[in-house]
Image: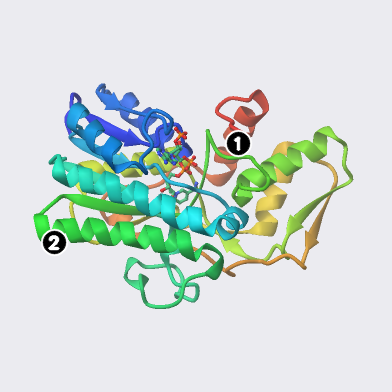
Amino acid sequence: MELNSRIYVAGHRGMVGSAIVRRLQSLGYHQIITRTSKELDLRNQVAVDSFFESEKPEYVFLAAAKVGGIQANNTYRADFLYDNLMIQNHVIHAAYTHQVTKLLFLGSSCIYPKMASQPLQETALLTGLLEPTNEPYAIAKIAGIKLCEAFRDQYGCNFISAMPTNLYGPNDNYDLQNSHVLPALIRKFHEAKINQQSEVMIWGDGSPLREFMHVDDLAEALVHLMLHYNDRLFMNAGTGVEITIKDLALLIKKITEYSGELVFDSTKPNGTPRKLMDISRLRATGFEPKITLEEGIRAVYEEYKQGIGVSIR
Ligand SMILES: NC(=O)c1ccc[n+]([C@@H]2O[C@H](COP(=O)([O-])OP(=O)(O)OC[C@H]3O[C@@H](n4cnc5c(N)ncnc54)[C@H](OP(=O)(O)O)[C@@H]3O)[C@@H](O)[C@H]2O)c1
């Protein structure tokens, strides 16, 4: 990828896509092609094809997707399966027909079987049943990985995939119905502080272990993979560091300077007890995550307070 290469970042207004654009710009790439979903609905195959025909991207980061937390995934099961299949089918197929040099498809750690042994290794894919709440989303993402592999096998396309762990950062979703745990906690603690609430309720008993990566670290990893990784097997992307939901809540309580109590609602589901990526293969390519969780959450909370990069959809 040269500095004047034509690079399409699909989903550039999202948390991951916007971080990829920032990373590319900081490195001097200056032909970055973007479209909002209003300008180009990636579920429309004809529109996608004519976009590739006219713009002729040479590199594609596929970070457009229908994304959400456990509740959204479980409620909008048809939309999560259908929209994601359509988006990725059209973009990956157009990348093949219009001879894109290289494409990077973004999946997620939810592709792994619910009972896969931890830390999650790439080889655990399709070795067991998925978590039922986000099965439609995971099935779409697994189909995306397989589509990239199949275009590589049959047509020799250089299509690679990366599976990020839980992410946070600028342009995250803070909607309490649809968001992931970390931005939801930031919003809950911030609002509890402003409204002088005596307690903050946390879903579950606080025991699950989770891994969180700042999206700027991820974007650095993705550009690194686009430059240096050309193999068939998809790549985990994470930090290799885990924390309990309780300790995460305590960390956010400290950062938001909230003085009330934490209350755990054990009637709500915990989800998978532990979810940690094995990132030894990513490390072996020469990438190392840099942003600690405390540093990252402090930066995100400053932005949240100032309304920078914060969208409440
Ligand atoms: N967030 C996480 O914690 C996380 C973790 C692991 C993996 N990932 C993966 O990273 C990728 C991006 O996630 P994200 O968190 O950046 O999501 P996001 O903030 O919700 O952004 C998704 C983007 O996709 C675009 N999009 C959605 N439907 C579209 C359509 N029909 N046509 C065109 N564009 C469409 C949206 O464009 P507009 O803004 O223009 O509507 C939006 O900017 C996804 O593949 C996701 O699976 C995310």
- Which quarter of the image is occupied by the C terminus? top right
Residue on which disc 1 sits: 313
How many badges with numbers are in the image? 2
Give coordinates of residue 169: x percent, y percent: 53, 38
**Left or right: where 56 falls relative to 129:** left
Please tell me how crowded label 2 is: few (under 14), some (14-19), or many (20+) other residues with Cα within 10 Å. few
Who is closer to the viewer here, 104 or 75?
Answer: 75
Q: What residue occupies the far front of the structure in this picture?
A: 46
Residue at disc 1, CB closer than 8 Å to ligand 1 = yes
Residue on which disc 2 sits: 153
Please tell me the numbered disc located at residue 150.
none
Who is closer to the viewer here, 264 or 6?
Answer: 6
- Residue 278 in sight from this viewpoint: no
Give coordinates of residue 194: x percent, y percent: 82, 32
Who is closer to the viewer here, 190 or 244?
Answer: 190
Q: CA distance from mark 2 to mark 1?
A: 39 Å
* Image point (49%, 53%), residue name: 79
* Residue type marked 2: Asp
Above or below residue 268? Residue 22 is above
Above or below residue 197? Residue 249 is below
Residue at disc 2, CB closer than 8 Å to ligand 1 = no
* Image point (32%, 34%), residue name: 9
* Image point (24%, 55%), residue name: 148
Please tell me how crowded label 1 is: few (under 14), some (14-19), or many (20+) other residues with Cα within 10 Å. few
**If you read the primary sequence from the N terminus, does the residue marked by circle 2 or circle 1 appear first?**
2
Give coordinates of residue 27: x percent, y percent: 29, 27
- Residue 239 in sight from this viewpoint: yes
Q: Secondary structure at mark 1?
A: loop
* Image point (87%, 42%), residue name: 197
Give coordinates of residue 171: x percent, y percent: 53, 34
Above or below residue 301? Residue 268 is below
